[in-house]
């Protein structure tokens, strides 16, 4: 869950803060941030898009190469391109760290389809944050959750057991309770026997 939050929100927070809400950063952090951006001629959204597109190209290239070569090229390309981009003044030091943390967090996600969806949403959120700031992040997140709560997967609500709320199903959601605490099967499965094996009541 922490990796999901980092992969979604970290680049957008950087863009919105450096573009609109720099007063929200403490002064001790604002001075190094201003120094790192002093040599960058592009607005935050442009440098973020340049670095994100570069990371995506390196990732796609590594997938299509043999395992050992792809791993080596991705590491070497990340180091060389990142260092050269900072020295050339194309991107700032802080953005290199943020994009690297975002890329690592996206690898932690267990579902490849979910990681791909987040990679696509990342660009939409970045553009929204560059136009509207924090408000764009809040609205984009709200629209994403609204879409997730209304879609279905194989006839079942995608966001169950949170929407519609099922208190019994919450036992096997973010934190899983011991099996002896989960006596009833999820009602969304619409089965005749509501109780699990060994817990039948007549």
Image (tube, rainbow, N blue to C red):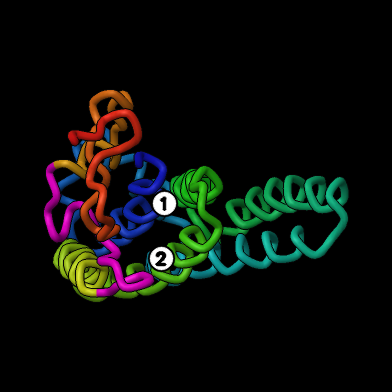
Instruction: Compute the Cα span from label 2 to label 1.
Output: 8 Å
Where residue 45 appears, as percent x and y from the top left, is 39, 69
Is residue 133 at least partly visible in the picture? no
Q: In the shown orientation, is residue 153 left or right of residue 193? A: right
Return the residue at label 2: 122
**Residue 160 painted magenta:** yes
Q: Does residue 168 lie above or below 136 as drawn?
A: above
**Residue 13 painted magenta:** no
Local crowd size for mark 1, using a 10 Å CA cut-off: few (<14), some (14–19), many (≥20): many
Where residue 61 appears, as percent x and y from the top left, is 75, 64
Q: Does residue 161 lie above or below 158 as drawn?
A: above
| Residue 53 quadrant | bottom right
In the rendered structure, find residue 7 and report the number of the disc placed on it.
1
- The answer to which of marks 2 and 1 sits earlier in the sequence is 1
Residue found at x 74% / y 53% = 77
Mark 2 and mark 1 residues within 8 Å of each other at the beta carbon: yes
Residue found at x 24% / y 58% = 188
Residue found at x 70% / y 61% = 58
Where residue 3 appears, as percent x and y from the top left, is 41, 42
- In depth, the one of 65 and 94 nearer the eye is 65
Local crowd size for mark 2, using a 10 Å CA cut-off: few (<14), some (14–19), many (≥20): many
């Amino acid at each position: 869950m922490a990796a999901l939050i980092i992969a979604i929100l970290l680049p957008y927070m950087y863009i919105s803060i450096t573009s609109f809400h720099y007063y929200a950063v403490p002064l001790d952090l604002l001075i190094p941030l201003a120094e790192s951006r002093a040599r960058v001629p592009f607005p935050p959204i442009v440098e973020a898009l340049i670095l994100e597109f570069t990371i995506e190209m390196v990732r796609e290239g590594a997938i299509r190469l043999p395992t050992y070569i792809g791993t080596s090229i991705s590491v070497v390309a990340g180091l060389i391109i990142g260092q050269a981009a900072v020295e050339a003044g194309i991107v700032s030091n802080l953005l290199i760290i943020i994009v690297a943390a975002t890329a690592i967090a996206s690898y932690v996600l267990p579902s490849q389809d979910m990681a791909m969806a987040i990679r696509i949403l990342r660009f939409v959120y970045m553009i929204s944050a560059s136009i509207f700031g924090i408000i764009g992040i809040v609205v984009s997140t709200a629209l994403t959750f609204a879409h997730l709560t209304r879609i279905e997967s194989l006839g079942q609500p995608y966001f169950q057991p949170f929407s519609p709320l099922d208190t019994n199903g919450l036992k096997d959601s973010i934190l899983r309770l011991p099996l002896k605490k989960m006596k009833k099967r999820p009602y969304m499965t619409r089965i005749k026997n509501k109780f699990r094996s060994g817990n039948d009541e007549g």
